[in-house]
C-alpha cells in the first residue's frame, strides 16, 4: 500500500467533460423559472421520463453508428413498422403479448441486418442504405396499417410503456422508489471507489478527494431529485427500468469489451483498424443489426405508451437520436462519445421539448431552438478539443 501512495499523482477534474451535464441542469432551471415551477412538478418529471424513454433507447444504439463515423436514418421508420406489427399481432391476430413483442423484435433485427448487409458486404455508404430503409419502412407501415390507427391495445400490452413498478405508499411518498434511489446511490459511490483504486493500481493520475466528493454530491443530488419527484407521483415507470438496463448493458459493452473497443477503433481510422486485424465488415454489420433491434424496442415502447400504432409514429425520431449523440459529445467521426453522454444529450432534447411546450412556444420556434442548441454543442465540443 505504501508503494501505491509513493506514486500517487493528482490531476484536477476536467470540467469540460461535464459540460453538457451542467448545460442540462442550467436549461432545466431556466425553464423552471419561465414556467413558474411547473417544469419541476412531480407529474411533469414523470412525463419527462416517460416521453423520452424511446429517445434514450434509440440514442444508445445510434451512438454506436455515430462512433463508426455514420448515422442510421431509418430508425424512425423501423420504430413505426415494428410498433405496427406488434399492435397488429395483438389486436388482429390475437397473439399472446410476449409473442407479439418477440415478433416485432425479430422484424427489427431483420431490418437492421438488411441494412447491415448492404453496408458491410457490398460497401454501399450507410447514408444511402439507411435513407432507403427509411422510405421502405415508412411505406410498409402505411401499407400494413392501411393508413389507419391500429388499437386500442390491451392494458397488459400498454404496461411496458405506461406502467409503473408496484408501490408501497407512506403518506404521499412511494417507499419502493426511495429504496431504488438508495441502492443506486450505494452503487455510484462504490463504483467511484473502485475506479479510483484501479487508477492507483496502475499508477494513473487521480482526482483530489475533495473534487471526487463534490462530483459525487452533485450526481447523487440529481439522482435523488429525480427519484423524490417520481416517489411523489406514481413511482418508478417501467420504461425507466428498461432504459436503465439497456444503458447499463451498452455502457459495459462500449467501455469494457473488445467489441466496444473495435467500434472506437473503426471510427478513429477504418483503414488502420482493418490493418490491425479488426474485421471492419463484421463490426459494421452487427452495429446496424443492433440498431434495428433497439429501434424495435423503442417501437414497442411507443405503441404501448400510446395504446395504439399509427402510420406517423416515429416521424423525425432519427433526428432526435442523432442530435442526442452529438449533443452528448460524439462530435467527430472518431469522437469520444459515450453511452452516458448520449443519455445526457437525450434528456437535453427532452427538457427542451418539454419546457418549450409548457411555455407554449410554437413548433417552428422549437425547431429553431433545438437546431441552435445542437450546433452550439458541436461547436463547443470541437473548440474544446482544439484548445486541448
Image (tube, rainbow, N blue to C red):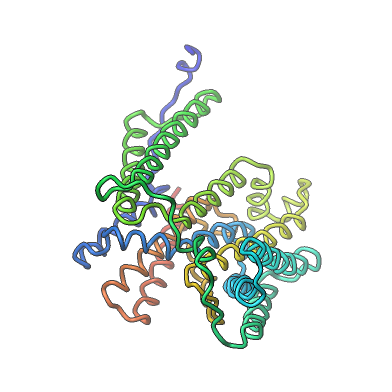
Check the image and report above or below for 338 versus 186. below
Nearest to the observer: residue 165 or residue 123: 165
Q: Residue visible at 68% across and 48% down?
A: 262
Q: Residue visible at 42% across and 47% down?
A: 17
Check the image and report above or below for 46 versus 205. below
Check the image and report above or below for 326 versus 213. below
Q: Residue furthest left?
A: 36
> Which quadrant holds residue 138?
bottom right
Nearest to the observer: residue 150 or residue 202: 150
In the picture, measured across the screen, residue 233 lies left or right of residue 313, that is left
> Which quadrant holds residue 354?
bottom left
Relative image position of residue 34 (x, y in whole percent): 21, 67
Nearest to the observer: residue 20 or residue 137: 137
Relative image position of residue 162 (x, y in whole percent): 45, 63
In the picture, measured across the screen, residue 369 lies left or right of residue 269, that is left
Relative image position of residue 116 (x, y in whole percent): 73, 65
Relative image position of residue 243 (x, y in whole percent): 50, 54
> Which quadrant holds residue 178?
top left
Check the image and report above or below for 157 versus 244. below
Nearest to the observer: residue 28 or residue 273: 28
Picture mark count: 0
Q: Residue furthest right?
A: 121
Q: Residue furthest bottom?
A: 147
Amino acid at each position: 500500500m505504501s508503494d501505491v501512495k509513493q506514486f500517487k499523482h493528482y490531476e484536477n477534474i476536467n470540467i469540460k467533460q461535464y459540460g453538457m451535464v451542467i448545460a442540462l441542469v442550467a436549461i432545466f432551471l431556466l425553464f423552471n423559472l419561465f414556467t413558474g415551477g411547473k417544469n419541476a412538478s412531480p407529474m411533469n418529471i414523470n412525463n419527462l421520463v416517460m416521453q423520452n424513454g424511446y429517445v434514450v433507447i434509440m440514442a444508445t444504439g445510434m451512438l454506436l453508428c455515430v462512433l463508426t463515423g455514420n448515422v442510421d436514418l431509418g430508425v424512425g421508420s423501423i420504430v413505426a413498422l415494428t410498433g405496427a406489427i406488434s399492435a397488429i399481432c395483438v389486436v388482429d391476430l390475437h397473439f399472446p403479448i410476449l409473442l407479439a413483442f418477440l415478433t416485432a423484435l425479430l422484424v427489427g433485427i431483420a431490418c437492421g441486418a438488411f441494412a447491415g448487409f448492404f453496408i458491410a458486404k457490398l460497401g454501399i455508404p450507410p447514408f444511402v442504405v439507411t435513407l432507403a430503409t427509411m422510405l421502405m419502412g415508412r411505406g410498409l407501415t402505411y401499407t400494413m396499417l392501411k393508413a389507419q390507427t391500429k388499437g386500442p391495445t390491451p392494458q397488459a400490452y400498454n404496461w411496458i410503456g405506461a406502467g409503473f413498478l408496484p408501490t408501497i405508499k407512506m403518506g404521499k411518498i412511494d417507499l419502493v422508489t426511495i429504496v431504488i434511489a438508495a441502492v443506486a446511490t450505494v452503487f455510484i459511490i462504490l463504483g467511484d471507489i473502485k475506479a479510483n483504486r484501479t487508477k492507483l493500481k496502475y499508477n494513473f493520475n487521480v482526482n483530489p478527494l475533495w473534487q471526487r466528493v463534490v462530483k459525487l454530491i452533485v450526481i447523487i443530488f440529481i439522482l435523488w431529485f429525480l427519484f423524490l419527484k417520481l416517489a411523489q407521483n406514481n413511482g418508478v415507470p417501467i420504461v425507466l427500468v428498461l432504459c436503465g438496463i439497456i444503458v447499463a448493458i451498452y455502457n459495459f459493452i462500449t467501455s469494457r469489451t473488445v467489441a466496444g473497443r473495435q467500434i472506437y477503433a473503426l471510427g478513429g481510422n477504418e483503414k488502420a483498424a482493418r490493418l490491425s486485424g479488426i474485421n471492419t465488415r463484421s463490426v459494421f454489420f452487427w452495429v446496424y443489426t443492433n440498431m434495428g433491434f433497439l429501434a424495435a424496442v423503442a417501437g414497442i415502447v411507443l405503441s404501448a405508451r400510446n395504446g395504439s400504432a399509427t402510420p406517423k409514429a416515429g416521424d423525425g425520431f432519427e433526428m432526435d437520436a442523432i442530435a442526442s449523440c452529438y449533443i452528448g459529445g460524439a462530435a467527430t467521426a472518431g469522437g469520444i462519445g459515450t453511452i452516458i453522454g448520449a443519455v445526457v444529450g437525450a434528456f437535453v432534447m427532452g427538457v427542451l421539448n418539454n419546457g418549450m411546450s409548457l411555455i407554449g412556444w410554437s413548433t417552428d420556434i422549437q425547431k429553431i431552438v433545438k437546431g441552435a442548441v445542437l450546433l452550439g454543442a458541436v461547436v463547443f465540443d470541437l473548440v474544446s478539443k482544439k484548445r486541448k
